[in-house]
Image: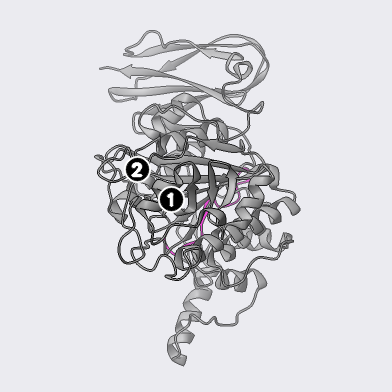
Amino acid sequence: MLLNGLPLQAFDGPVLHDLFNVESDTDRVLVLIQLSGGNDGLNMVVPLSEYSTYKGLRGNIAIPENAVLKLRDDVGVHPAMTGVHALWNQKKVNLVQGVTYPNPNLSHFRSTDIWMTGSASNVDENSGWLGRYLNGEYPNYPDGYPNAAMPDPIAIQMTAVASLALTGLNHQSMGIALQDPESFYRLVSGSDTPGSDLPSSKYAADNITYVRDVQVKSQQFSTVIKAAADKATNKETYPTANKLADQLKIVARLIAGGLKTRVYVVQMGGFDTHAAQVDASDTTIGAHAGLLKQVSDAVSAFQKDIEALGAGERVVSMTFSEFGRRVESNLSLGTDHGTAAPLFFFGIPVEDGIIGTNPSLTDLDNKNLKMQYDFRQIYASVLEQWFSASPTVIRNVLFDEFKTVRVIKKSTTDVDDTQIADTFSLDPIAPNPVRTETSIRYTLKTSQNVRLEIFDSIGFHVATLVNEDQSPGAYVQSFVVNNLPSGTYFVQLRANGDRRTQAMVVVR
């Protein structure tokens, strides 16, 4: 679908309900910044503690030691990244070193798929890690949406096509894709003036404008997006001729305008720097330097803007790229496809500092950097520390357990707060297996809103047994299974911002 020239894809479909996160009204926002092409992490984050080795391995592209912007004595960032360096000094940056996955794939397409799906490198998965998570948060989407509780897009991506990361379990998506900032601003300004993207032929332009107009009127989210954009005005001046800044400028405006959208994805390409990565006469400038400057300037402006707009405490941004580059440079003043690379978190809520160490430039794996952290550890950390997902949810979303690292400052909303976990319990189902009827027992230690539901093995809603406020005490809820086919089902109890799940087997 089109939103005044912006390709839109609404993310929908049935859900694997065992992936449910806590049912809570949260205003926390995650902004994913995709650096497409495979970013050269060694020139982005320069290992000063191994500078002589670094210089020897990539002498024709190495950043001069005295030009590096120091984060610490042992490590610094590219001299073009002045904005990020300033955020570091403000304690709003978390750097994670050496992120990749076991048996990394050096194909752009395959490696991107792996990062988007959150799967192992030997598994072909067709749903995305955020798609699975958001599916659990909004189980019946699109049925009944938009509604009073969630009137807005669940996720927004600033590209023509929604990424695999946001794809749900049945090839559906959980948000909308907005391609063109120019078209977006035409939408929110109410202007019908054709954009520069229209063909020169009058008849073709008229037809395209007509189709866009018709589809804008049929797009259910265009009204709420325009309303949010109309409520807020950017307070920071963003850099010009910067595609990433153009996207983040829109994101800031929508966040400040009150959209309840949970996830925004922005993208910047050009990081496949096989040749002319640097200028032959000055390695601090060139193609890669220009890219890093755009990223740094855009992120810096965005952070200042959301803080000025009063949203700084509830927004976290994260960069990622499908892989890093080779340790050794090539003869074309560039770098070839590699493996591990650093990624950044930005924002007031992030745990400032560095996770991991400078990568070893001598202990290599087939001339590539070794892994320090699996990227799924980072995803697990975001789900746990930012969205307060339970260990069970994280394990199901990522298909396995991954040790988390501290990327978000600890707060009372962390899922390791045992006060939340101790306020209710759900007993094992008995009898189980069930032929006709079973009893579901649970205990509440405090008064709270309780929701008790049944889901089948692929996540379809079967029944809601309880949805009301209840006082402390022990409860027994009977459930008759006469109409259910044989199979495995899940009994799920949600209360006080947490959930418990028990399996139930129906036999005939």
Q: Check whether the beta carbons of the residues at disc 2 and disc 1 lie within 8 A of each other.
A: yes
The structure residue drawn at horizontal position 52% and vertical position 60%, both measured from the top left corner, is 292
- Secondary element under disc 2, as helix, strand or loop, is loop
Comparing 49 with 279, the one in front is 49
In the rendered structure, which amino acid carries the disc numbered 1? Answer: Leu
Left/right placement of residue 136 relative to residue 469 reads left
User: Where is residue 33 shown, x and y percent of the image?
Assistant: 51, 53
Specify whether residue 231 is in view. Answer: yes
User: Where is residue 283 shown, x and y percent of the image?
Assistant: 47, 64
The residue labelled by disc 1 is: 42
Please give the count of numbered marks on the rendered protein.
2
The span shown in magenta is: 147-161
The residue labelled by disc 2 is: 369
Residue 228 occupies which quadrant of the picture?
bottom right
Left/right placement of residue 473 relative to residue 162 reads right
Crowding at mark 1 (Cα within 10 Å: few <14, some 14-19, many 20+): many
Task: Based on the picture, tell me whether residue 159 belongs to the magenta stretch.
Answer: yes
Residue 71 occupies which quadrant of the picture?
top right
In the rendered structure, which amino acid carries the disc numbered 2? Answer: Leu
Marks 2/1: CA–CA distance: 10 Å
- Secondary element under disc 1, as helix, strand or loop, is helix
User: What secondary structure do most residues of the magenta stretch adopt?
Assistant: loop
Task: Based on the picture, tell me whether residue 243 belongs to the magenta stretch.
Answer: no
Residue 161 occupies which quadrant of the picture?
bottom left
